[in-house]
Image: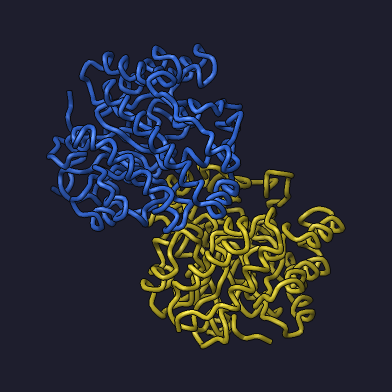
Chain colours: A blue, B yellow
Amino acid sequence: MSFDYLNALQKKPTSRTPVWIMRQAGRYLPEYRATRKRAGDFMSLCKSPDFACEVTLQPLDRFDLDAAILFSDILTIPDAMGLGLYFSEGEGPRFKKKISNAIDITNLPRPNIGEELSYVNDAVSQIKKALNGRVPLIGFTGSPWTLATYMVEGGSSKNFSMVKGLMYEDPKHMHLLLDKLADSVIDYLDGQVQAGAESLMVFDTWGGLLNTESYENFSLRYMQKIVEGIKSKHQDSVPITLFTKGGGMWVEKIAATGCDAIGLDWTIELGDAQNRVGSKVALQGNLDPCVLYASPDRIREEAHKVLSQFTGNTGHVFNLGHGISPDVDPEHLKVLIDCVHEFRGQV
Amino acid sequence: MSFDYLNALQKKPTSRTPVWIMRQAGRYLPEYRATRKRAGDFMSLCKSPDFACEVTLQPLDRFDLDAAILFSDILTIPDAMGLGLYFSEGEGPRFKKKISNAIDITNLPRPNIGEELSYVNDAVSQIKKALNGRVPLIGFTGSPWTLATYMVEGGSSKNFSMVKGLMYEDPKHMHLLLDKLADSVIDYLDGQVQAGAESLMVFDTWGGLLNTESYENFSLRYMQKIVEGIKSKHQDSVPITLFTKGGGMWVEKIAATGCDAIGLDWTIELGDAQNRVGSKVALQGNLDPCVLYASPDRIREEAHKVLSQFTGNTGHVFNLGHGISPDVDPEHLKVLIDCVHEFRGQV
């Protein structure tokens, strides 16, 4: 097994820069589309440990990746809370029920993760077994704030008017919602670790829509609670990466949560982030996914720019700054991954 | 005439914090919706100086605003270049023709602003006359990068794959496109100044999607060209505000263009921006527009937070961090504007 990914997260020396790709198991791969077709809809794919395991492993057979990531969705917890997650063509995730007011929040149950989300833990166990030590397995969750945006909006949103309206008007109940979510997320991630996940990632897709004060109070605070909850159970044995899209302005604050690594999108320079957080945390990122639309030579050139910004030979996990797009040529991703591994930069 | 708005932009003392609101003439006002209905479609509203004048003045009759802004669209220049702008229900702006490659870019004509965009200059003249010195009039444009995104994508976009693909693959022709746009924008803004605009604003709605290097090369560089072009014709008599949504990380670089003011969205703290740019430029912003969904007391509280962050009694123009949303109660905006004017903060 290559330990480069886990070593980088723990700021230990690595033989080369480890790389994995957000949404590496996904629609840009024809073999994924074939499995998805066999599974039926997206949720059937997520809920079947066999299918989830199959698609998790697909990118590893094509590319020299340093980690696998559980195939699942960030919205499994609200689904288990009874909101009824479904996916409608071209519209993304939707909930049959949404959270509109204080009463909805008060009545929201804490799901029994071991029962209602057993399919996730089963998938983790099965993937772990199938990996057979090839690469480490990453478990993940959506951040409480990000889950709350979908729960209050009923799905994706353009300007997040409902969830932000609720936050500004009734911060007390928004905190209650986020606290409930954080508790469930801790149970959920703990279950994934017990089933075999060796690293955890929290996706805060929508934290970057908040102002600094709201980000600290409504997003970061609950990610910190999760970090503390997991560390109290597993100490430093399972590194945790926090990824707030658009959170480049807040890297010092994110580093102060006690997380092991920060995921960065491409709008912050990797070198700037490194200067600001020092050796406190590892950094993951941060190539613009749109670079993969360009030719191999240009892909290498842009990847080298990112790689060259990082000083030292540990603490960097290469990734895109956001999930890979469905219309990218898989051969272009191969060019990128090989180029990252071949890079011999400043040490 | 209240000079607070122009004084604040020129860092001269003001009697109170001036305020205007992005999209203050817009769909949240019933009187706007009525005029729009009479005009027919959105472009007919923009292209009629009578209608454009009418809706520009509407918010001034309701609210104690410190500036008026020309009613128009940011995409008038590509329309004048022959791309055929239209608006389809629920989809936002679309172009009949789009820019796909080097040949399209090379063949793109430089419009004769005085002819093809005479309706804009006519609107400015008519508004200026109707205002009769009540408040200053702001002219505006989209930034070259922002215009290019719509021209290459053919409209709004989710992940800007086409325009970024072109930028990464063929930077030379992307620069040619941006240079052509910058030249046209200079002509366009100069025309607005000659027709009576007393201040100019450049909306860089999509610059924040770029990484730092690309932002400097493909967005900021061309805004700087515009600043220099206008300053060479009008010196410092017409203050220029540059607004990059999501550009909080780059305020020092924006200030270095020679602009007079920087528009800020809510993701950067106003006090932080002020510390970073010093007294080099004025600052405009930056309340989260979603605050207007909350109750009057909460609106005042959040507005006070923004106002309290700014030190000194000059150089701040209050605004939202983005355009006002169509579903906001106009009475809530009144609460905000009055609260800004009543504020007596740290001096």
Spot occupied by residue B125 in the image (x, y as percentages of width and height): 76, 77
Spot occupied by residue B22 in the image (x, y as percentages of width and height): 62, 65
Observer-nearest of A171 and B76: A171
Spot occupied by residue A139 in the image (x, y as percentages of width and height): 32, 29
Task: Say above or below: A190 vs B9.
Answer: above
Left or right, A164 with respect to B126, comes to left
The residue drawn where x is 57% and y is 87% is: B15
Q: Is residue A136 visible?
A: yes
Task: Say above or below: B97 vs B246.
Answer: above
Task: Say above or below: A223 vs B116.
Answer: above
In which quadrant of the rendered image does the N terminus of chain B lie?
bottom right
The residue drawn where x is 46% and y is 73% is: B308
Q: Is residue B152 visible?
A: no
Left or right, B79 with respect to A255, comes to right
Spot occupied by residue A24 in the image (x, y as percentages of width and height): 38, 29
| Quadrant assignment, res B169 | top left
The residue drawn where x is 58% and y is 42% is: A157
